Amino acid sequence: MSWKAQAICVDCWHRAHPAHRAPAREDGPQDRCVMCGNETRAGLYERLDTEAVPFPAPDYDDPFDRPLGYDYEVLPDGRVPVWIMGGIGDQARAVTPWRKHDNPATLSIAEIARDAGIAPGEVVGREFFAAGDEHKLTDFRLKHDPRK
Ligand SMILES: [Zn+2]
């Protein structure tokens, strides 16, 4: 048995969370839904047992198959790379140098959106730089800001 965060499509997410609207994107990383096997770019991830899903995510033996953030490290200038791999309500699931895909950190989507000057709906699926450490991250900036 191996629990890890795995990609899930919008339809399967809604089946699992009928009371919520999926915080989905259309331009997230290309993934395969572990429940139905369809391709998804929704940027939605669920922590699931790889042996309990029909299409389990691969183990990342091949470096080119590794998900975004797999190799995150704090930059020499102190900036911390953060990828928001998913979210529910205001809770973002974040990959950081200290918290990987199988155990993502929980951050506030509203806080990230406010710092970065973007809409809360734009946060999931994007990469940011933040200040701080494994205990507290602040001052989120878009890694690729199209406005600059
Ligand atoms: Zn699906």
Image: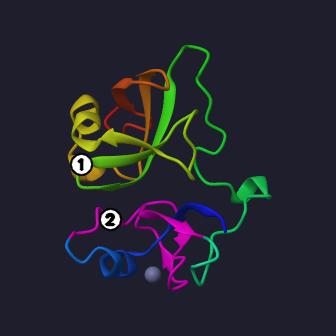
**Where does residue 56 sit, x and y in percent of width and height?**
62, 75
Residue at point 53%, 48% (across, down): 103
Q: Main secondary structure of the magenta part?
A: loop
Residue 25: which quarter of the image?
Answer: bottom left
Q: The residue under label 2 is which amino acid type? A: Ala
Residue 123: % across, % down: 32, 47
Q: Label 2 CB, ligand 1: below 8 Å?
A: no
Residue 57 image label = none
Residue under label 2, please give it.
24
The residue singled out by tag 1 in the image is 90
Residue 21 inside the magenta-drawn segment: yes
Task: Decide: is 81 above or below 38.
Answer: above
- Colour logic: rainbow
Please identify the quadrant where the C terminus is shown. top left
Comes first in the chain, label 1 or label 2: 2
Q: Can you tell which quarter of the image residue 114 is in? A: top left
Query: In this picture, is 37 found above or below 32?
Result: below
Secondary structure found at label 2:
loop
**Do residues under tags 1 and 2 come within 8 Å of each other at their CB atoms?**
no
Helix, strand or loop under label 1: loop
Assess whether residue 31 is covered by the magenta stretch: yes
Which quarter of the figure has residue 65?
A: bottom right
Q: Which residue occupies 37% across, 37% down?
A: 145
Image-quarter location of ligand 1 = bottom left
Nearer the observer, disc 1 or disc 2?
A: 1
Left or right of 56 on screen, residue 64:
right
